[in-house]
Amino acid sequence: MKTRQHGFTLIELLVAITIMSIVAVLGWRGLDTIIRSRVALNNELEQTRGLQLAFAQMQSDTGHIAKVEDIGKRAVLAVQPGRLTMVRMVFAENQPSRAQVIAYRIDGGVLTRRESIATRDLRELDAAWIAALGDTTSVPAVALHDGVETMAIRSWVDREWRAAGAEGGTGPGGSTIPPTGLEVSLRLRDRPENLVKIFLLGAA
């Protein structure tokens, strides 16, 4: 008596292979989506971390901005689109306070920062200020963040925001009203929204 052997037919094998192929493709697409999302999230976190460090540096600088009367009635702030120049005070242990010029710039899509040598000599401070405004300083720039298209700045003066280049106002007796706050807005490449940070001048 012959025993009948049972097995898969060719059609059954083809159907099984087709189903396995579909499952494999769906699984690969799901894995690819997860990997791409993870890479994008890591890039976003890295970009956010870099901007937080840049804004933290700005906050430290603006918090220690010099007072006009401390440096012989000289200007302590100059604001233009993509350019922020200021004089900040430097305090070190067992040393007298000194002043230095800080310059933020957008250079080729990179947010950079330069700082002059801290000094108590007002002539050296004047030279550093002129060099910073004319971008003729030999001090190397420190790159804070790349992929920055624009930096827009507004100043808080006399209870209103004023655009870059209009940060000063005329008060009683013709005196200039200094700004008390800054709004820095960065436009990053490939991001539709601006990143905005407000700094209170001299808050440190």
Image: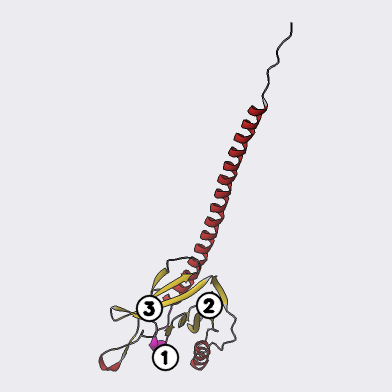
Q: Is mark 1 on a helix, strand or loop?
A: loop
Q: Quadrant of residue 137?
A: bottom right
Residue wearing tag 2:
113
Q: Residue 114: x percent and y percent? A: 54, 80
- Write the residue at 34% across / 84% down: 178
In primary-sequence order, the first of circles 2 and 1 is 1
Q: Distance between the residues labelled 2 and 3?
A: 19 Å
- Write the residue at 39% across / 82% down: 164
Relative to 3, does residue 157 appear above or below in the rendering?
below
Q: Residues within 10 Å of mark 1 (few under 14, many from 20)?
A: some
Q: Which of marks 2 and 1 is in front?
A: 2
Q: Of residues 11 and 21, which is closer to you in this image? A: 11
Q: How far apart are marks 1 and 3 (CA)?
A: 21 Å
Q: Of residues 97 and 36, which is closer to you in this image? A: 36
In primary-sequence order, the first of circles 2 and 3 is 2
Callout 2 amino acid: Arg
Q: What stretch is highlighted in magenta?
A: 64-76
For the rendered model, the colour scheme is: secondary structure
Residue at the front extreme of this rendering = 11
- Write the residue at 54% across / 61% down: 46
Q: Residue 184: x percent and y percent? A: 42, 74
Q: Is residue 68 shown in magenta?
A: yes
Res 26 label: none
Q: Is residue 172 shown in magenta?
A: no
Residue wearing tag 1:
74
Q: What element carries label 3?
A: strand
Residue wearing tag 3:
154
Callout 3 amino acid: Arg
Q: Of residues 157 and 117, which is closer to you in this image? A: 157
Q: Of residues 91 and 6, which is closer to you in this image? A: 6
